[in-house]
C-alpha cells in the first residue's frame, strides 16, 4: 500500500464537473493498493498518517499532527502509484491490486480515518477525477507499508 500525502490549504476532487470532495486545511492523500495488500497494512498507515507531525506549532516548527489542528482529509484512489516503468515507455500496472480488492481496502482505509479525523472526504473509486490543490509548504510525504 502506498500513500502520497500533501499538506494543503485546500483541495478538491471533481467527477464530470461536479465537486465530490472538498477540504480546507489538512492532507490530500493519494491512495494506492498493491496486489496482496491487507487491512493490517491499512491500519498501520492510518495510524502513521494521523500522527504525522508536519503542521506548524506556535513557534513555526513542524510539530503538530492533523488531529492536533483539527485538520481535514481528502482521500483519492490512484492505482497509478503502482506504475512500473522499468521496461519500455508504457507503464505496467500488474503490481496494483485488482479493482475489487483495491476498492475494499480504499473504503476500509477511509472508514478507519473517519474514526480519528472529523471531516474525511473522498473521490469516487474507478472514476476519471480532476484533483486540484493548494500545496502548503510545499510538504509532500510518501508512506508505504
Image (cartoon, grey):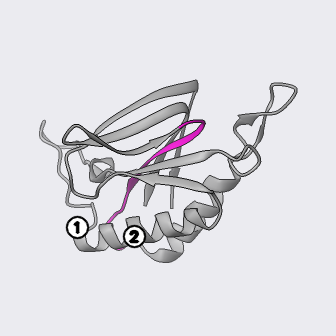
Q: Which residue is mark 2?
A: 105
Q: Camera-side residue: 51 or 85?
A: 51
Query: Badges 1 and 2: C-beta atoms under 8 Å apart?
Result: no
**CA distance for labels 1 and 2:** 10 Å
Identify the mark at residue 99; answer none if there is no mark.
1
Instruction: Answer with left or right where residue 102 lies relative to residue 85.
Output: right
Looking at the image, which is closer to me, 29 or 145? 29
Which residue sits at x=12%, y=41%? 90
Question: Quadrant location of residue 106?
Answer: bottom left
Q: Residue at x 48, y 66 (%)?
A: 109
Residue located at (36% from left, 62% from top): 33
Pick out the residue farthest to the front.
18
Q: Position of residue 121 (x, y in %)?
A: 46, 52
Q: Earlier in the sequence, mark 1 or mark 2?
A: 1
For label 1, the SS is helix
Residue 66 relative to residue 102: left or right: right
Residue 29 lies in magenta, yes or no?
A: yes
| Residue 130 x/y as whole percent | 27, 37
Total numbered badges shown on the rendered structure: 2
Quarter of the image for residue 15 reads: top left
Q: Position of residue 104 (x, y in %)?
A: 35, 73
Numbered range of the magenta stretch = 24-36
Q: Is residue 68 above or below residue 103?
A: above
Vertical arrangement, residue 109 with respect to residue 124, above or below? below
Amino acid at each position: 500500500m502506498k500513500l502520497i500525502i500533501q499538506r494543503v490549504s485546500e483541495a478538491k476532487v471533481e467527477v464530470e464537473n461536479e465537486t465530490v470532495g472538498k477540504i480546507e486545511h489538512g492532507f490530500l492523500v493519494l491512495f494506492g493498493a498493491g496486489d496482496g495488500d491487507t487491512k493490517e497494512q491499512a491500519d498501520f498507515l492510518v495510524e502513521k498518517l494521523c500522527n504525522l507531525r508536519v503542521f506548524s506549532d506556535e513557534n513555526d516548527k513542524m510539530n503538530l499532527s492533523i488531529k492536533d489542528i483539527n485538520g481535514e482529509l481528502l482521500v483519492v484512489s490512484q492505482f497509478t502509484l503502482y506504475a512500473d516503468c522499468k521496461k519500455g515507455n508504457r507503464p505496467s500496472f500488474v503490481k496494483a491490486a485488482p479493482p475489487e480488492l483495491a476498492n475494499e481496502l480504499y473504503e476500509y482505509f477511509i472508514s478507519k480515518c473517519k474514526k480519528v479525523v472529523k471531516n474525511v472526504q473522498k473521490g469516487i473509486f474507478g472514476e476519471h477525477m480532476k484533483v486540484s490543490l493548494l500545496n502548503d509548504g510545499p510538504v509532500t510525504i510518501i508512506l508505504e507499508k
